[in-house]
Amino acid sequence: MTCPECDGRLRKRGTETVCEKCGLVSEEDAIDRGPEWRSFDDDDTDRRRTGAPLTRSRHDRGLSTEIGYASGSDSYSSRLTGRKRRQIARLRREHNRARVSSKVERNQIYGFAEIRRVHALLSLPDTVREESCSLFNSAQSEGLLQGRSLEGFSAASIYATCRMCSIPRTIDEIVDVARADENELKAAYNALNRELGLPTGPIDPSQYLPRYASKLDLETSVERRAREHVRTLLEEGSIGGRNPSGVAAACLYKAAGGENDPSSITQADVADVAGVAPVTIRSTAAELEER
């Protein structure tokens, strides 16, 4: 961003964008986009009028309305007669049916609900949920869901988003909480990666270390030594083609003492946490021994 008058650098100060060189105000935004009211915890009234924010995790972006269920002694529903209650129930049922106009939207509702469920169980950031639903929608627009399970694409969307955002989550961790098995997830992920060209790259093994160290009840000093082992392997380019989860587990095993310390963790324990075979731990630990 440069000044249109003197080509100086522009800097945003408060609500104005000012040139550092000549002082020209190129843009101005004095609008207060916050609410014009204040809310307090002890206030019984709710002044919000805009409803929930827009979200990609719902097929209608959260714009549709619902006929709710009011409760309380002073609520309107408590004063309705039996005939009026039945009428409201029929209206609510027909309204929910009218929200879904096609099979595409019905599949989106089911797929997005599965994504939200897996996202909650894995305690992932909200951005992962939004991007996963957007990726699921892109796959549906490209016709990739035909002949494949919705559960597999929901799980694969979360796994692909974690890969793109460099969030350390393995396939086994997602399969444990998803309604899809490993084969369904891999088939859907391969279709996403092949047809959509996902910008996925290898995950840094050091990102697995805090979680694995916590599960193995290891001290901070062990995690710090394991991080140094990972850095050494990265600098030497020795982890190409290796499972980053297995590399992280092997570095923790080596940092904890390995075979030289009988009281330390075993290869089987580390392999079980990382979801890899003990031979993977053994081969990486042997490579660290040579250095």
Image (tube, grey):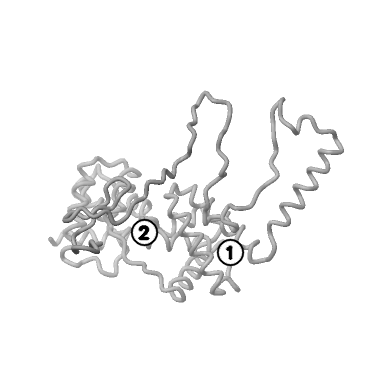
Q: Quadrant of residue 105?
A: bottom right
Identify the residue position indicated by label 2 in the image. Answer: 165
Q: Please state if 76 lies on the left or on the right of 65 as rendered.
A: right
Comparing 74 with 157, the one in front is: 74
Question: What amino acid type is highlighted by mark number 2?
Answer: Cys
Q: Nearer the viewer, mark 1 or mark 2?
A: 2
| Residue 134 locus on image (x, y percent) | 49, 62
Q: Earlier in the sequence, mark 1 or mark 2?
A: 1
| x then y, percent, for residue 196 | 45, 73
Q: What residue lies at 52% left-to-right and 57% top-to-bottom?
A: 56
Q: Is 110 placed left or right of 4 in the picture?
A: right
Question: Mark 1 and 2 residues: CB-CB less than 8 Å, in contact?
Answer: no
The image quadrant where one finds the C terminus is bottom left
Please identify the quadrant where the N terminus is shown. Answer: bottom left
Q: Which residue occupies the extreme top position in the image?
A: 42
**Residue at screen point 51% across, 59% down:** 133
Percent x, y for residue 286? 20, 61
- Disc 1, SS: helix
Q: Is residue 26 left or right of residue 147?
A: left
Dot 2 surroundings within 10 Å: few (below 14), some, or many (20 or more)? some
Whether residue 287 is visible, yes or no, is no
Amino acid on which disc 1 is placed: Leu
In the displayed structure image, the side of residue 206 where residue 271 appears, left or right: right
Marking on residue 78: none
Marks 1 and 2 sit apart, C-alpha to C-alpha, by: 22 Å
In this view, the residue farthest toward the bottom is 195
What's the residue at 49%, 57% (across, down)? 175
Q: Tell which residue pokes out farthest to the left in this image.
A: 291
Say which element carries label 2.
Answer: loop
Which residue is tagged 1? Answer: 150
In this rendering, is residue 171 above or below 213?
Answer: below
